[in-house]
Image (cartoon, rainbow, N blue to C red):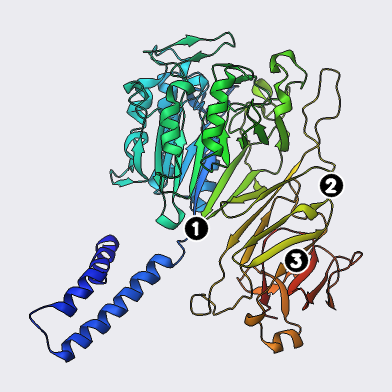
Amino acid sequence: MTISYRATLTHYASKNFFMTLLNNKYSMSRRYLVKSTSMLIVLFALLNGASSASAEPWKFGVMGDSQWTTADPDNANPNTVPVAIINQVNQEFIKAGVKFVIAVGDLSDDGNDISEVTRAQAAQPLIDAGIGFFPFRGNHETVGLNKSYGLSVFHSNYPQTRTGTFTKTNLQYYKVGNNFSSPVSVSTELNGMSYSFDYGDPESRARFVIVDTWAMPGKVDKNPNGYAYGYTVNDQQAWISSRLDKKSRKTGQAFVFSHQPLMAEGHQDTMFNGYTHSHPDWQNRFFASMQDNGVKLYISGHDHIHQRSIISSPDGKSHIQEIICASNSSKFYNPKPLDDPKWFGQKSRETSISQERYTVGYYIYTVDGPCVTVDYYSDDHGNWMSDANYPNGAGKADTGITPSFHFVKKETWSYSTNGKEFLIPQGTSYAKVSDSFKGTIARILDGTNNSTEKDCSLDTKGGVGRKLTKTVDTGWYKKQSPSQSKRGEYLASNILCLTGMGDLGRKQTDVYTLSISYDRDKVHLQHFNDGLFGLATKDTDGNWINAVDKNSGGARTFVAGPWKKGYTLGTYGIDKRSKTVWAVINYNDNFAAARFSK
């Protein structure tokens, strides 16, 4: 009905129809024409309002490898599928209100047909809640006894990868996504295995491209690294590039998924039919197709570890942020030594950002127009043992019993198609962070990355791991007039989204000074005089408040004038000469120059 109504508005408010009314040789009375014209103007305004208003943010979930690899005293995890873990993660996705969930492969441990059916059944609570479920194969799907590399059982259990259609337990049907595509010109075996689809309203639409390079009955390449590959990235590159093409795809966002990382931590194989040094020409083309088309995130599994890194292409011309998903299994891996010979010297292409081991976790992605925010949740216990010792170690009475997890948010990061990203190594200044949007300028004036966090990627002699680099991202939302705002608020700047300055597990960031310019014509004199104007953020109720009121510690101290070196946490001010507001804060959020509610 919505589409029909808007189509009607578009027709009747079009210029051609309006001119037809004015020039109709069968003239109407002046009174009727005036009334009709007035009605059309109103309809045209309604249409413009509908098309210009921002779409509501929407979410999708991502979950890691799901394998059960140990004893099962409770009989809760049949056929090597960790159903007791999956059920808990499913409930988190349902509570979060995600539109669909993507599972990054290794859907069971033994890859047998009955195991793959069990995994599909474990996704049914999501489907019954109206949440789509989009899986793809991992290497474990190719090792079962079915002799077809899991192809037939995948097709029969997951028709949604070709159509987006889901069936609830009560036999009701619904559809998630549209514009489905597979590289069938390469092989019909790839239909629904490598696949792509779109989701979202025009203002917040995203494209998802999923690449499957595993063995199929029609093509098997036994590689020295021990894996059976099929149709290669190079075979599928033309399709990948066409689906990512930002000129034709008509989506603001695009995400790329495959089971194997571009460069893993525990595993040394890649999706490029070999180790990290294999087929550099394939890698360069694949990396370039992502970077040149605005893809910011490549999402994978395989490693059973939460890892974020910036990976460079072999030729150094392209860079992509890789997210390796935390385990949803009874299995966890450790990073291999950085100087292990099977890395072939390629670890220099990786900049480590964040890492967490031995935890069960999941991801919520929020798409909000130009901005994508990722929240990583994991259980607050962690330090689980792996495989036969899961969860608490050999000799424990509850070995093999899935714990009840308490998931907490460990990390939030974002990117925006209208913002920038800055890599800030430890010990260096945040002052390089500067961005502008439609007349608003934001700068970090002071602050240092004082983190001492390291990952667990040691060398063969031991060592202390790599120092983690921060990725500081800016993004922007256009300010609204009071009539457009739900609360009638009025801002004197556009809204800055700033993320990436915190360490994993900590909400508090380093202390830094943020400055945002304001439009002098949008600020009334009493705003300066009553002390209720400055750098602002929103509270939990959605009200704009003084930014320093959300600090951890510090004291609110106002300064009429520019920022100066040495101002302490909680100091804030207005510099009328430069038309900026500034504050010394220690958290990331959305910020603007605004009048406070109190």
Sequence-wise, which precedes: disc 3 or disc 2? 2
473 vs 548: above or below: above
The residue pinned by badge 3 equals 515
Q: Indicate the amino acid at tag 3.
A: Ser
In space, the residues marked 1 and 2 are separated at their CA atoms by 34 Å
Q: Are marks 1 and 2 in contact (CB under 8 Å)?
A: no
The residue pinned by badge 1 equals 57
Q: Quadrant of residue 563?
A: bottom right
Q: Residues within 10 Å of mark 2 (few under 14, many from 20)?
A: few
In space, the residues marked 1 and 3 are separated at their CA atoms by 27 Å
Q: SS of the residue at dot 3?
A: strand
Between 371 and 385, the residue placed more toward the observer is 371
The residue pinned by badge 2 equals 428
How many marks are shown on the rendered structure?
Answer: 3
Q: Quadrant of residue 282?
A: top right
Marks 1, 3: nearer the viewer:
3
Q: How crowded is mark 3: few (under 14 residues within 10 Å), some or many (20 or more)?
A: many
Asked whether the viewer can see residue 135, the reply is: no
The residue shown at (26%, 81%) is 39
Marks 1, 2: nearer the viewer:
2
Q: Where is residue 532 in the image (x, y as percent from the top left)?
A: 73, 81
- Quarter of the image that includes the C terminus: bottom right
The residue shown at (39%, 71%) is 49
Q: Indicate the amino acid at tag 1.
A: Pro
Q: Position of residue 383 (x, y in %)?
A: 73, 34
Q: SS of the residue at dot 1?
A: loop
The residue shown at (68%, 78%) is 596
Sequence-wise, which precedes: disc 1 or disc 2? 1
In space, the residues marked 3 and 2 are separated at their CA atoms by 19 Å
Sequence-wise, which precedes: disc 1 or disc 3? 1
- Quarter of the image that includes the N terminus: bottom left
